[in-house]
C-alpha cells in the first residue's frame, strides 16, 4: 500500500468511527484501488431515516474537518443516499431501502473488505446490526 493509500485508510477509519458514534448500521469499507481509478476506498453505512443520514454525514464531516480534511463534493441531501466524496475515499450513507436497491457491496465485492472489528464499538444488544461479539451481521 502506498503512503497516500495508507493516509486515506487512516481517514477511512476516522469516518467509520464517526459513523459508529452516531449509531450507523452495517458499516463496511472496501479497498477498491486495484479495481477503479475513481477512489482508493469506499465506505457504506445504513441510516434509519433522512434525519439520521444528515446526522451521520455531519459527524463524518466534523471529525474529518478536525483532522484538516474537507470533502471534495457532497451529493444527495434530500434523497435516501448521501455521498461524501473525499477523492481518495467515498462515504455512502443510505436508508435501508436505498442500500438494498443500489447494493454497492455487490458492485465492489472484488475489492478487499477492511476488517473493522477493532474499530467498531461492541454493541451486545445488536442495535448496530452486528451480533456484537465478532462484528458480523446478525441473522
Image (spheres, rainbow, N blue to C red):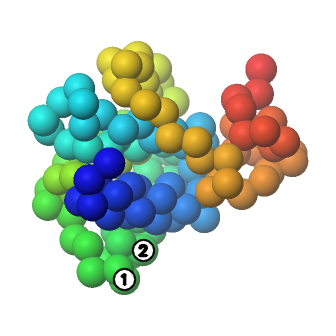
Q: Residue 115 versus residue 131: which sits nearer the camera?
A: 115
In the picture shown, does residue 128 fall above or below 2?
A: above
Residue at 46 percent across and 20 percent down: it is 100
Q: Is residue 104 left or right of residue 119?
A: left
2 shown above or below 80: below
Give the x, y percent position of residue 89. Answer: 27, 50
- Residue 3 circle label: none
Residue 51 seen anywhere in this rendered image of the structure: no
Q: At 20% from the left edge and 42% from the top edge, which residue is drawn?
A: 39
Question: At which x and y percent is residue 117?
Answer: 67, 47
Q: CA distance from mark 1 to mark 2?
A: 5 Å
Compared across the picture, whether 19 is left or right of 12 comes to right
Residue at screen point 45% across, 41% down: 29
Asked whether the beta carbons under mark 1 and mark 2 sit within 8 Å of each other, the answer is yes
Which of the labelled discs sits on residue 66, or is there none?
A: 1
Secondary structure state at the residue bearing disc 2: helix
Residue 108 visible, this angle: yes
Q: Position of residue 22 (x, y in %)?
A: 58, 61
Q: Nearer the viewer, residue 122 or 97?
A: 122
In depth, the one of 131 and 48 nearer the eye is 131
What element does badge 1 sit on? helix
Q: Which residue is mark 2?
A: 63
- The 10 Å Cα crowd at callout 1, few under 14, some 14 to 19, many 20 or more, is few
Q: How many marks?
A: 2
Looking at the image, residue 92 lies above or below residue 3: above
Amino acid at each position: 500500500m502506498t503512503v497516500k493509500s495508507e493516509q486515506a485508510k487512516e481517514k477511512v477509519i476516522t469516518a467509520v468511527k464517526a459513523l459508529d458514534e452516531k449509531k450507523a448500521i452495517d458499516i463496511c469499507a472496501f479497498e477498491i484501488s486495484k479495481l477503479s481509478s475513481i477512489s482508493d476506498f469506499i465506505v457504506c453505512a445504513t441510516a434509519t431515516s433522512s434525519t439520521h443520514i444528515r446526522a451521520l454525514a455531519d459527524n463524518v464531516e466534523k471529525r474529518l474537518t478536525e483532522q484538516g480534511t474537507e470533502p471534495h463534493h457532497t451529493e444527495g441531501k434530500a434523497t435516501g443516499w448521501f455521498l461524501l466524496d473525499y477523492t481518495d475515499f467515498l462515504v455512502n450513507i443510505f436508508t435501508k431501502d436505498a442500500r438494498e436497491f443500489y447494493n454497492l457491496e455487490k458492485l465492489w465485492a472484488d475489492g478487499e473488505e477492511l476488517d473493522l472489528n477493532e474499530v467498531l464499538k461492541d454493541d451486545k444488544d445488536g442495535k448496530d446490526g452486528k451480533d456484537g461479539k465478532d462484528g458480523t451481521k446478525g441473522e
